[in-house]
Image (spheres, helix red, strand yellow):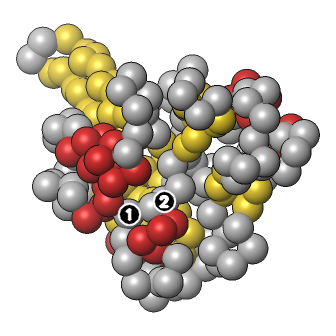
């Protein structure tokens, strides 16, 4: 089982409804984010210019470096859902996992003195029926949640429909193997390898 998000950048409008839904559902402190939406571009020369919006949250890596460096086992992969999570009761606030994450998508909760991150709304999705708040509240219908190992899941179908040449991942600086997939057709914009 590999639960993940697939995000259709052809449809994403950069409205930040996923960011707001995430903060409200998970009671995230002011100034902290588990999900961000960043503009990529504009690039090109007028009138041939491109811009797309890139939501960035935990990439649910197959080989999560955050889990490997955690000295207490607070960062772990749930054995039932495969989702990378943080057990706050074990977190000592050392922030090693934040340094190890190549995507900068973990936050330090200054009030609780623990690290937090996107959980794919495991409190809503653990039973296999719900969906993350960001998916439910995406007004553009650009976000999908499911199991990559299930060919009948919505995420597997969206990836198959898009074609391999239009499916992208954030760059992998080591051996993390991020599973979050982004769909972007070249007719909309050219995928940029972010550094």
Residue 95 in which image quadrant: top right
Residue reaching furthest left? 47
Marks 2 and 1, how far apart at CA: 5 Å
Vertical order, 189 against 153 (above or below): above
Which residue reaches farthest bottom?
152
- Identify which residue, 185 or 155, lies in the foreground: 155
Q: Position of residue 18 (x, y in %)?
A: 28, 47
What is the quadrant of the N terminus in the image?
Answer: bottom right
Q: Which mark is residue 132?
A: 1
Residue at the limit of the structure toward the right, as seen here? 71
**176 w.r.t. 95: above or below:** below
In the drawing, does residue 2 fall left or right of residue 77?
A: left
Label 1 crowd (10 A; few <14 / some 14-19 / many >=20): many
Q: Residue at x 24, y 18 (%)?
A: 42
For the question of whether residue 166 can be seen, the reply is no
Where is residue 28 drawn, in percent x and y? 40, 39
| The C terminus sits in image quarter | top right
Q: Which residue is mark 2?
A: 120
Q: Where residue 151 appears, x then y in whole percent? A: 51, 85
* Residue lying at 52% horizontally and 76% vertically, measured from the top left: 126
Q: Residue shown at 45%/61% (left/top)?
A: 121
Q: Can you give x and y, in whole percent of width and height, for residue 181 in the image?
A: 48, 54
Please tell me in which quadrant of the rendered image residue 167 appears. Answer: bottom left
2 or 1: tag closer to the N-terminus: 2
Question: Which residue is found at the position 90% from the left and 40% from the top?
Answer: 71
Q: Disc 1 on helix, strand or loop?
A: loop
- Residue 20 sits above or below residue 139 on the image: above
Q: Is residue 193 left or right of residue 154?
A: right
User: Is residue 105 in sight in this rendering?
Assistant: yes
**Badge 2 vs badge 1, beta-carbon distance below 8 Å:** yes
């Amino acid at each position: 089982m590999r639960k993940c998000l697939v995000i259709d950048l052809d449809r994403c409008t950069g409205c930040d409804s996923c960011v707001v839904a995430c903060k409200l559902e998970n009671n995230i402190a002011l100034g902290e984010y588990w999900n961000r939406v960043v503009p990529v571009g504009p690039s090109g020369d007028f009138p041939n210019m491109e811009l797309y919006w890139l939501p960035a949250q935990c990439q649910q890596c197959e080989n999560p470096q955050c889990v490997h460096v955690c000295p207490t086992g607070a960062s772990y992969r749930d054995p039932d859902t495969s989702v990378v999570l943080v057990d706050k009761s074990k977190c000592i606030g050392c922030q090693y996992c934040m340094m190890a994450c190549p995507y900068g998508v973990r936050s330090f909760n200054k009030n609780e003195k623990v690290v937090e991150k996107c959980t794919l709304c495991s409190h809503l999705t653990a039973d296999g029926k719900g969906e993350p708040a960001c998916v439910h509240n995406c007004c553009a219908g650009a976000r999908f949640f499911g199991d990559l190992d299930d060919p009948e899941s919505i995420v597997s179908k969206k990836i198959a429909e898009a074609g391999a040449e239009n499916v992208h991942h954030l760059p992998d600086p080591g051996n993390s193997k991020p599973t979050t997939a982004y769909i972007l057709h070249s007719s909309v914009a050219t995928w940029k390898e972010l550094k």
